[in-house]
Image (cartoon, helix red, strand yellow):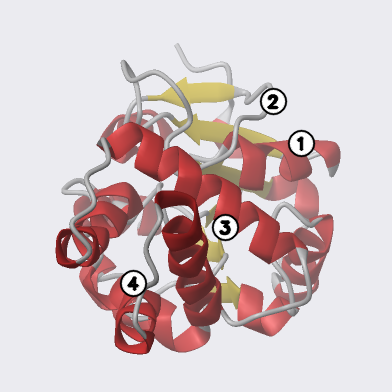
Amino acid sequence: MSPIDFRSFDALTFDCYGTLIDWETGILNALKPVLRAHETTVEAEPLLEAFARHEAALEAGPYLRYADVLAGCLRGLGDELGFEPTPTERTTFGRSVTEWPAFADSPAALARLKQRFKLGVITNCDDDLFAASNQRLQIDFDWVVTAEQAGGYKPRPENFVFAFERIDVPRERILHVAQSLFHDHVPATALGMTTVWIDRRQGRAGGGATPPADAQPDLTTPDLKTFADLATA
């Protein structure tokens, strides 16, 4: 039995990358040709953890569009691994979001949830890059809040406050659903939200492409289908 009474909520807000879109697969696929061109070999998990460090540092600084954050991550990875990515490689990696795949269960689960709740997304991305990802999700979100619109990145609480101003549902009736403890659950719970952790990395050590963080979600499920089963029962 779920510890959450889903009848208490009218809207669900989602993180996108890592929750709905398989960004770790997308990141690794986009890095493979670069590493191969520079004759560099790195195991997947250390590479994702290095990416997480560079991304978090860039997002905590002066605002950059997400395509530029990714380009900066590639430059940082090159510095760390001993190669210099070309301008074309940086640009291509910065735009690689458009190629990142959706998790297999995301479109159907979102369609089911849409029948019961209003749906929003609070994403660390640019408007145009998210629009490309949304085509893979095949859902018409009621609200889309991007880092570009908010002028900064989660885990800033300002991104959530910005979303609350856009969403015409009381905060206490919004349930936030996300994979990243660092980007989402820490700030959302600090703001008094009820949260659900989609623990896509179950069984794998470490945080992958997200920095480590301590948070206490109200519910944990291994994937979006399981969450949709509970929320629409």
Q: Could you classify mark 3 by the number of other residues whose Cα lies within 10 Å: few (under 14), some (14-19), or many (20 or more)? A: many
Above or below, comparing residue 133 to residue 86 in the picture:
above
Left or right: where does residue 157 sit relative to residue 146? right
Q: Position of residue 22 (x, y in %)?
A: 29, 51
CB contact under 8 Å: marks 4 and 1: no
C-alpha distance separating marks 1 and 2 = 8 Å
How far, Cα to Cα, is label 4 from label 1?
Answer: 28 Å
User: According to the image, label 2 marks what residue?
Assistant: 215
Q: What percent of the width, then of the height, locates residue 186? A: 73, 37
| Residue type for callout 3 | Glu
- Quarter of the image containing the C terminus? top left
* Circle number at residue 97: 4
Q: Nearer the viewer, mark 3 or mark 4?
A: 3
Q: Residue at x 43, y 88 (%)?
A: 128
N-term-proximal mark, 3 vs 4 = 3
Alpha carbon distance from label 3 to label 1: 22 Å
Q: Amino acid at mark 4?
A: Val
CB atoms of marks 3 and 4 within 8 Å: no
- Tag 1 secondary structure: helix
Is disc 2 placed on a helix, strand or loop?
A: loop
Q: Amino acid at mark 1?
A: Thr
Task: Tell me the CA gap for discs 3 and 4.
Answer: 14 Å
Tag 2: residue type? Ala
Tell me which label, 4 or 1, sits earlier in the chain. Answer: 4
Question: Label 1 belongs to which residue?
Answer: 189
Residue nearer the viewer, 54 or 159: 54
